[in-house]
Amino acid sequence: MGKFLRFLDEYLEEYLASLLFVVFSTLMFINVIMRYVFQNAIPWAEEMTLLFFVWFVWFAIPFATRLDNHARVTFIQDLFPKKIKALLNVFLSVVTIVLFVFLIVSAIKYLGHSAVKGKTGLLVPYPMWVFYIPAPIGLVLTVHRLLRKLGKDFRVLFMSSTAVSEN
C-alpha cells in the first residue's frame, strides 16, 4: 500500500490534469469541427467542456504548487539574503494555507446551497455538485502541497541559521 500512496502523492494531480486537459481539448476540437465543417454542433459538448475544464483547473493548481511553478512576483524577495527569503516563504505559505482553509470551508458550505443542492446540468443531467466539488478537492490537495513545501522551507530556514551560526 505504501507504493500506491507514494504513486498517488507523486502523480495524482499530474495524471488527472493531463487526462482532463486532453478530454476537454479533444471535445472542444470535435465540436468546432462539427459546427464549422458539418454545420451541426454537438449540443452537450460545450457544457461538458466547461465541466472538464473546471476539474482540470482545480487539479492543475496543486500540481503547479507541487512543482513550485505557479505565477508569483519575486523581484523584491530576490533582494534579500537566503535566510530572509526563507522567512518570507514560510510567512507566505502560512498566509496562503489559512486563506485556502477558509476557501475550503466556504466551498464545502456552498455544496449545500440551494443553487447546487438538487439541481442538475442543463443539457447533461449530472448533479450540479459535480461542477462544484472540484474546488474543495483541489484546495485540499493544494493545502497538502503547501504543507509539504512549508516543511521544506522550515528545513532551509533552520539549515541556513545553523550554517550561519557555525561560520
Image: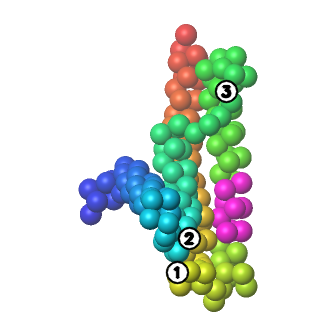
Query: Is mark 1 in CB contact (under 8 Å) with mark 2?
Result: yes
Q: Disc 3 marks which residue? A: 74
Residue 100 is covered by the magenta coloring: yes
Quick one: 136 or 151, which is closer to the camera?
Answer: 136
Query: With respect to residue 118, does 46 lie above or below?
Result: above
Residue 146 is tagged as: none
Q: Name the main secondary structure of what is drawn in magenta.
A: helix
Real-space Cα separation, disc 2 to disc 3, in angstroms: 38 Å
- The three-letter code of the residue at mark 1 reads Val
- The three-letter code of the residue at mark 2 reads Glu
Residue 12 is covered by the magenta coloring: no
Task: Measuring from the top left, give residue 118's x and y in whole percent.
Answer: 63, 89
Q: Which residues are magenta?
A: 99-107
What kind of colouring is applied to the model shown?
rainbow
Query: With respect to residue 130, does 17 lie above or below?
Result: above
Which is nearer the N-term, disc 2 or disc 3? 2
Quick one: 25 or 128, which is closer to the camera?
Answer: 25
Quadrant position of the C terminus in the picture = top right
In this rendering, the label closer to the viewer, 2 or 3: 2
Real-space Cα separation, disc 3 to disc 1, in angstroms: 44 Å
- The three-letter code of the residue at mark 3 reads Thr
Which residue is depicted at the point 70% across and 75% down? 110
Whether residue 2 sits left or right of residue 52 in the image: it is: left
Residue 124 is tagged as: 1
Q: Secondary structure at mark 1?
A: loop
The quadrant where residue 99 appears: bottom right
Q: Is residue 51 visible?
A: no
Task: Measuring from the top left, give residue 10's x and y in whole percent.
Answer: 37, 49
Q: Disc 2 marks which residue? A: 47
The quadrant where residue 2 appears: bottom left
Task: Measuring from the top left, give residue 158's x and y in whole percent.
Answer: 56, 30
